[in-house]
Structure formats: structure tokens, C-alpha cells
Amino acid sequence: MLEQESDEALMLRYAADDSTAFECLYARHKGPLYRYLLRQVHDKALAEELFQDIWLRIIAARARYQPSARFRTFLYHLAHNRLIDQYRRSGRTPIQEQDCPDHSPAARSWQPDVRVENQQAAVRLLQQIENLPDAQRETFLLKEEAGLSLEDIAQITQVNKETVKSRLRYAMRRLRAGLGESP
Amino acid sequence: MNDQRDQPKVTPLQDADAAALAALYHAHAQETPPAHLDETILSAARAATQQPARPRSRRWLPALGGLAASVLVVMVSFQLLPPANVDPDTPAVLADHAQPAEHDAAESKLAAQAPPPPAAPARQQSLATNQQPESAAASPSSQPSAIAPSDDPPALMERKRHSPLAPNSEEITAAKPDLSSAPEQPNAALDAVSPAPAQQPVPMLREIETLWRAHQTDQALKRFADFEQSYPNFVIPSEYRPLIAQLRQAQAARGANPPQRDTTP
């Protein structure tokens, strides 16, 4: 029953003290959110701390939640802001302030049909994702992990849609190039 | 923006590549949060439902009640003060008798003009009177939320300090207790705002920090022990790790033999 309800309906149920609705919501989003944070901070302990903090904020904000936006957008907006906060604390340049010029070589020889099942290619892909500039990596993860639209990503990262498209394109290009260059 | 220049044209083959890349990514990116983290978050979520959040529109009620009670107490104390009617034309013979009355009047004036000493009891009383109807009603909906900003003022002061993203800074300011008005009785002020028993972990940590900073070591250690018992798997946020280390040292110094718990997950 609950599995078929939308995120927003589940959040409203939770605001009305139905904790099983929260469990369902949590089960839906915990993996993607965790991986989004893990790939962004490259530190398991820190990712866990941020993950816990984000969910506790959602719990705390349940009474104020208004389904005016998609829950998923709300969740990743919170996560994005928390990441920016963390970057500032640690002295890193926040994502928005970084430009993401692309100087990577164009994709050359990676053949997805041949290598898609290849475990080594997957390991290399994860390494390439880690090496992406912050803004490109975040855009890639918001699309692939959170399943957000370009408009939603633009709203969360506070850039325009064209910039999101561009970041995504450059990210894909770098990933393809990285996989093509690898042995 | 640099990334809007020289945009490469996407060919159908590249689209296929992108889909294949995404498929490859999803096939191998399967990390999930550890079970203890799931447990911590879900238990916090369940605990929050046991203390229903008070609607935002009614959060000013306790503050208003406290203010009204404070005004009432001040007015009553004025009424109870002895009258200070000293006639300036009092004969010299009576001056000696009048002197104590003048002294009393001066003292009462000073007492009336110096708010700090009566402020703390007044506030305590006001809070007590404010809390009494809620506890008497014993209604779960009247219980303060563990996470509602206006219900845990010392925690909120800390929250305001630590969390720039906290959404309700205006409420935090409104609910901030005037601890400076009762410097002689920090215990009373802190006791008056002691939190509800089932508290969320981060507010609990803030409360412990407040107690610790106010040199309420015993209470801080006691609350810390409660915290460890309530949230054994909680990942301590980095900003609280120095505090936790200090608390552990204090525990060890007292020979409490606390259960060893790693702050770094």
C-alpha cells in the first residue's frame, strides 16, 4: 500500500505521525542519497555524518513540510546545501563558485557494448567519477542517483538549465575519455 | 561561463554511450548506508512521532505565557512592598524614626530598579506556572516537540551558532532565555529550561554542551550517560567530537569507567 504512494504523500503521512511512512520514504531514498554524498566527499565517515544530519533535519522539518515541491528536490536541495556548508567549513571551494572548464580529450575508443559487463570498466568508471570536477560530478550524480530532471538539477544547484546540460555533457565526455584511455 | 563555450555536439552514438555509461554505473554502484545508521535514523524518526510537533502558529504561546506571568509577578511584588511615604516636612524630632522608613524606601527603590536578582525567580515561577497547565492537562499534543526550535532554548542558541542553514532563526531569537539577567543562579535558569525526557540526539548534544560550558559538570556527565544509553549508534557530528572527548576524560577522571564508544565511525 505505502509503497505505491508518492514521496510527498508519505512525507505528509509522516508529518501526521505515521512513522511507517517515513520508513518507506527512507528505504526509497537512502541508497541514492548515500551514494551521492559518498561520491562527493570521498570519505565514508563524513558521508555517514552528513547523511545522518540530512535525515535528522528532515525529521525535524516534518511539521513544516509543504508539498509545494517534489520531495526528491527538497531532499537533494538540503543535501546540496549541507555539502556546500561542509566545503566551506573545510576550506574547499563550494561547488557553485567553481567553474568547470573541460580540457579532457574527446572520447576515443571506449565501446560500451563490448565493455558494459566488464567489472574492470566499472571500477575505472567509479574512479573517473571521483576525478570529475565537483560541479560536473554533482550534476552527474543528481541525474543518475537522484533521477532528477535538468530543471530540478538547475534549481538545486542554482544555475541555469543550459549550464546543467553543459556540465552533464562534459562529465560524460570526460568519463568516456577516461574509460577509452584506460588499458 | 566557460562551459557554455565550445559545446560539443551530441551525436546519437554519444547518447548511446551515455546510456551505456549510466547502465554500467548503476550496475556497480550499490553502496548503502550501514545498518547502524539506518537504525539511528529510524529510531529518531519514531521518537519524533511520539512527541508531535507543535504547529508553528502556536509556538509563541509559551513565550507569551511566560511574559504575562513575569509581569504579574513583578506587579504582585510591587504590591507587597511596604509603602515609602516620607513626608518632607517631617519634624526633626521624628527624623530618627523616619530614617528607617527612608532607608527601607531607598532599598525598595533599589530593589525595584535592580532587575537581576528577582528576575530569575520570577522567570522560574513564570515558567513553572506556564508549564503547570500543560502537565496538568497531560495531553500528548501539548507536549513540546523535541525538535521544535522554540522548545529547547539553550539548544537553539547553540543551533543558531552552529547551523547557518537553520530555518527558524527568528524563532530562536524569540525563544532565547535571558540567562544574563540571573547571573547568580545559572542552575535555576538551566533547570527551568530542562528538556523533555525523550529528546532528539543533536538537541541533546547541544544541551550537554550548554551544561558543560556552564560548568555544570555533574549534569553534563549525567546527560551524556543518558545520551550514550539512548543513542549508542549515533554518529557524533564532527563539531561535537572535542566536547565528547572532554566528557570522556571527565568521566575517566571520576573513575566512572564509561563504556568505550568510538566517535569516529
Image (spheres, coloured by chain):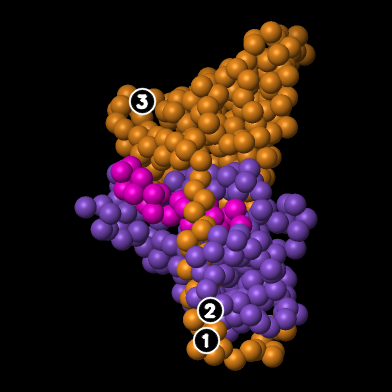
The answer to the question of whether label 2 and label 1 lie on touching residues, with beta carbons closer than 8 A, is: yes
- Tell me the crowding category of disc 2: few under 14, some 14 to 19, or many 20 or more residues within 10 angstroms, Cα based: many
Q: Position of residue B265 (x, y in %)?
A: 62, 36
Which residue is more in the foreground, B57 or B205? B205
Tag 2 residue: B17
Q: Which residues are magenta?
A: A19-39
**Callout in the foreground (2, 3):** 2
What's the residue at 60%, 53% (across, down)?
A38
What's the residue at 47%, 31% (across, down)?
B199
The answer to the question of whether label 3 and label 1 lie on touching residues, with beta carbons closer than 8 A, is: no
Tag 1 residue: B13
Q: Position of residue B86 (x, y in %)?
A: 67, 21
Give the mark, 2 or 3, whose residue is nearer the N terminus. 2
Above or below, B125 relative to A156: above
Which circle marks residue B135 in the picture?
3
Chain letter of the residue beneath label 2 in the structure image = B
Q: Secondary structure at mark 3?
A: helix
- Tell me the crowding category of disc 3: few under 14, some 14 to 19, or many 20 or more residues within 10 angstroms, Cα based: few
Image quadrant where residue B257 sits: top right
Instruction: State whether residue B110 appears in this view.
Output: no
Chain letter of the residue beneath label 1 in the structure image = B
Please state which amino acid type lies under the numbered disc 3: Ser
Q: Is residue A20 left or right of residue B234?
A: left
Chain letter of the residue beneath label 3 in the structure image = B
Instruction: Based on the picture, tell me whether residue B261 belongs to the magenta stretch.
Output: no
| Figure colour of chain A | purple
